[in-house]
Amino acid sequence: MENLRLLNKRIVSRINANLREFNFDAGSFAANAIEYDKLSRFYCLYGVTSCHPIDFNFRNASMAGSYFLGKCSVNQSIIYKSDIRGDELKRKGDIMDQENPLPLIEDETIVINNSLLYKTLVHHNSRNPETPEEFTIRNTVSSHYANIHGATMEGCFLGPFSTIDLMDLHSCIIGEFSYIQAGELFHKKIDPGVIHIETDEFCFKFKYKPEILAKYIGVNDSFQPRGLIYNFVTGKEPEYEHLFRLVDVDPVDAPDSSAVNRHAVIKGDTRIGENVLISQGAYLNNALMGDGSNAQENTYIIDSRLMGMDVTAHGGKVINTDVGQKTFVGFNSFLFGKEKARLIIGKGCVVMPHTIIDIKTPLEILDNSIVWGYITCEKDLKTNSIAMDKLNQFAGTLNIGDMIFKGNGKSFIDAFVQRIEHILEANGAYCKDGSELRGHAQNGQQISFNILHPYRSGNNEGIYPSIRIRP
Amino acid sequence: MENLRLLNKRIVSRINANLREFNFDAGSFAANAIEYDKLSRFYCLYGVTSCHPIDFNFRNASMAGSYFLGKCSVNQSIIYKSDIRGDELKRKGDIMDQENPLPLIEDETIVINNSLLYKTLVHHNSRNPETPEEFTIRNTVSSHYANIHGATMEGCFLGPFSTIDLMDLHSCIIGEFSYIQAGELFHKKIDPGVIHIETDEFCFKFKYKPEILAKYIGVNDSFQPRGLIYNFVTGKEPEYEHLFRLVDVDPVDAPDSSAVNRHAVIKGDTRIGENVLISQGAYLNNALMGDGSNAQENTYIIDSRLMGMDVTAHGGKVINTDVGQKTFVGFNSFLFGKEKARLIIGKGCVVMPHTIIDIKTPLEILDNSIVWGYITCEKDLKTNSIAMDKLNQFAGTLNIGDMIFKGNGKSFIDAFVQRIEHILEANGAYCKDGSELRGHAQNGQQISFNILHPYRSGNNEGIYPSIRIRP
C-alpha cells in the first residue's frame, strides 16, 4: 500500500502549495477521510453505451466505489465513491462560443489530475471557452457530497455539501454547504453557507447564520461533516450495499421511455411515469414521479409526489412534499416535510440551491414563487421568497431578510427558466415516440457497466492498473 | 449486432480457407453454437493480481462469459465462456531452449486472432521455440470443452472435448474427444476418440470404438456435442449461475496456503487441505482434497477423496472414487464410480488423458499403474492398463487391447513423472511457510476480477469496446 500512501501525500502537497496563502493543510482532511482498506476493496464502474463517447484512461489512480461515463482521463488521483458523468461532453465540431465560432478540434474530455475527490459528484456541462476540448480538475481536494458542476477547478478545497456551478475556480477554499456560481474566482476563501450567484446582469447573495448551519451541516477541525443532513445521508447508505454486490439487478417496473439507473434504491409504493430519469445513487421511497420528472444523482424522494416535468437537481432531498408541475428543486436542497406537516410547493417554482425547509406544521408555497435560505414556518416565507412576477419587473437593489439581490430581475428569471428547459430537454423529458428529442432518460437505458478492481496486495494495493477503454 | 455477425462470418471464412482441402465448413458449427443474445448479455473477467504480468489488449472482439489472466491480446475473435490463463507465461530474459540459450527479448503474450473459441480452455505452457515471445491461436475454431494446452494453433477446427497438448497444429481437423500430443502436425484430419502421444523416443496410440464413443461424446451434423459426458456437464451448468451474479462472494473455508477460486462450486461436506489449488469452473461436492492436491479448470470431484499431491487435469471428472497419493488424472478423464460401485485408484498411478471408467461393480486399480481407454470392469483392466515397473523396462512394440506402444518405456514413464512434478510445483503443492516454492495456489489468492461488458445496443451490440489494461 506504499504507493497509495505516497499518492495521497503528493496530492496533499500540491493542493497545499496552491493554498499556501491561507495556511491551509488538506492533509488533516485526507488523513481522517480516507479508509485505506476500502480503497483496496471497492471497485469502480465505467458505463458502456452506444450513445455516449467511450474513452476512459486511468493511470496511477485509486477509484474505489466511483462511477464514470464518457471520455474521462484520471491521473495521480484518489476518487472515492464519486460520480463522474461525461454524458454532456461536447463533440468534435461543436461550436461552444457563438461570438468566436471555432469548432472543437476533438471530442471534449474530463481530465482529473493530482486530486482527491471524496464522495463528490462531477457533472459536466462546462462553459469555459478557454479549453473547450478539456474539462479540468487539477490539484483539488473536495469533501463529502460536494458538487463540481461544469466548473473548472485548480488548486481548490471544497467543503462538505458545497456546490461549484458553471464557473472557474482557482486556488480557493469553499466552506461547507456553500453554493457558488460566479464566473471566475481566484485566491478567495468563501465562508460556510454562502449562496452566491452572479453574472454581469445580476447578483444574488444569501448567507446562513452559523448557528443554524451548524444544526444541519457543520464540520470538525479536520473538515469532516456532521449535522442533521449528513446523518440523514449516512443513515441511508446501508440500503445501497446490495446493489453493489450484484453484477446485474432485475429491472424496475417503469415505462420504456424512462430510465431507472440500476444503482438507485427504489422501494415502497413508488410509481414512475413516462420520460422519467432516475440517476445513480437516487433513493425513492413511496415516490410518485410524474411524466418528465427527474431524480438526479444523490437525490432522495421520500413519501413525496412530483407532479410532472419537475427537476430535482443533484443532492436534492424531498421528503413528505408535493411538488407542482415544472418546479425546480436546486442542488442539495433539503425539503423536510413531516407526515403531519406536509410541504406543498406550487407549479413553476424555483427552490434555490441549498435551501432548507424544515417545518413542524403544514406549509404551502404559492405557484411561481422563488424560495431560498432557511424556512421553518409561514412567517419565514415572507423573508425567504418572492413572487416571480414581482422579481421579473424589478431592477436595482433588493433586500429581503438575509438575501440581497442586485441588478435585473428579468435576467435572473430568464436564466433560471432557460436552465430548467435545458435540463428537461437534456434529460429527455420531452421525448416523443422514443426517438424524437431523446435525452439521458432514453440514452441511459441500454447501459452496461465495466467493474474495475484495484490490486489487492503488494506495493500497489488499492491502486488500479492502467486502463484504457475506447470504442 | 451487424458487426458481430460480420465478425463471425470473417472468422468462418478464414478457417474455411485454411481447411479447404477437406471441404470443411466451420459455418454450420458457428451458426448452431452461437447464441447472439448471450454474447451481448454476458460479461467477461480479467484477473488482477500483484503476482502475474498484467497486459490485456482487446480489439473488435466478443468475449461473453470468458476469463482472462496475464498478458493476453485478442483481436477479431469471438471467445465464449472460455478460460484463457496466462499464469505460465515466460518473462523477458527467460531462457526457453537450452540448446539455443537466447533470452526472450520481451514478456510472452497470448495472441488470439480471427478465432472462435467456444467453451474452450486455453492453458499455456508453450514449448514452441519458433516464437518464444508469442503464443498464437489464429484462424481457429474450437468447440465445446476443447482444451488448447500450450499448443500453437493455426487454421484448425477442434471437435468437442478434444485436447491439443504441448505441440503445434496447422490446418488440421481434430475429432471429438481426441487427445493429441505429437510435436507438430500439418494438414491432417484426426478421427474422433484418438489418443496419440508421440515423441522421438516413444509413441502411444489408442482409439475408441465409434459405438462406445457415441454413448459418451458424439456430435451431430453441425458438430454440436451430445452423449453422457456432455449431458453430465450441461446438467451442472445452472449451479454456477449465482457465482456470476455476484461481484464478490464470501470466501470458502480453506487453509491460508490454499486457493479456492471464487468461480468454483463448493458444496456438500467438502474439505480442503494445505497447498490445494481449486481453479475457476471446478465443481466439488463431498470432496476431500488432500494436501497439495489440485482440481483444475472444469474438473468435477464428487463424492470422492484425493489423498494428497493428486493432479486432476483440466476437465477431469472424478465421481465416487478414491484416488491414492500422487496419482495423475489426465485431461477430460471420466471416472464414473457409483455409490454402490466405488472406484479405488492406488498411489502413484497415471490415468491417461481421455480415459473413461464407467463401472457397475466396485473396482480397484493397483498402485503405480497406468490405465487408459475404456474400462467398465475388472476384465477391461487387463486390456487397458500396465504396471509402471513393467513398462519402465520395456523397449520395442507392445500391443495391449486396442493400445499400441512403440519405443522406450522408460522415456514414457520419465516424461509423465517429470510432468506431474512440474504441475505440482507450478501449482504450489510443495509450498513451505507461505513463501518458499510458491505456485498458483498461493499466487492466485489475492486476485480481483475486472468485469467487462459489451455494448448492449447499436451496430456494435455484443462487441466489446477496445480495452487495454496494463500495470
Image (spheres, coloured by chain):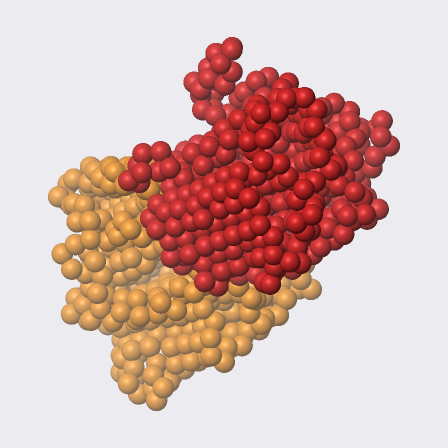
Chain colours: A orange, B red
Q: Residue at x 39, y 50 (%)?
A: B273
Residue B284 visible in rendering: no
Residue A344 visible in rendering: yes
Closer to the camera, A51 or B193?
A: B193
Closer to the camera, A115 or B217?
A: B217
Q: In the displayed structure, would residue A404 be above or below residue B376?
A: below
Q: In the displayed structure, would residue A231 be above or below residue B179?
A: below
Kindly indicate the quadrant of the structure image that contains residue A376: bottom left
A282 on left or right of A92: left
Percent x, y of residue B214: 78, 49
Image quadrant containing the C terminus of chain A: top right
Image quadrant containing the N terminus of chain A: top left
Q: Residue at x 26, y 52 (%)?
A: A35
Kindly indicate the quadrant of the structure image that contains residue A415: bottom left
Percent x, y of residue B286: 49, 60
Q: Residue at x 34, y 89 (%)?
A: A340
Q: In the displayed structure, would residue A420 be above or below residue B77?
A: below
A199 on left or right of B203: left
Percent x, y of residue A68: 45, 49
Closer to the camera, B9 or B205?
A: B205
Kindly indicate the quadrant of the structure image that contains residue A313: bottom left
Q: Residue at x 79, y 38 (%)?
A: B26
Closer to the camera, A98 or B394?
A: B394
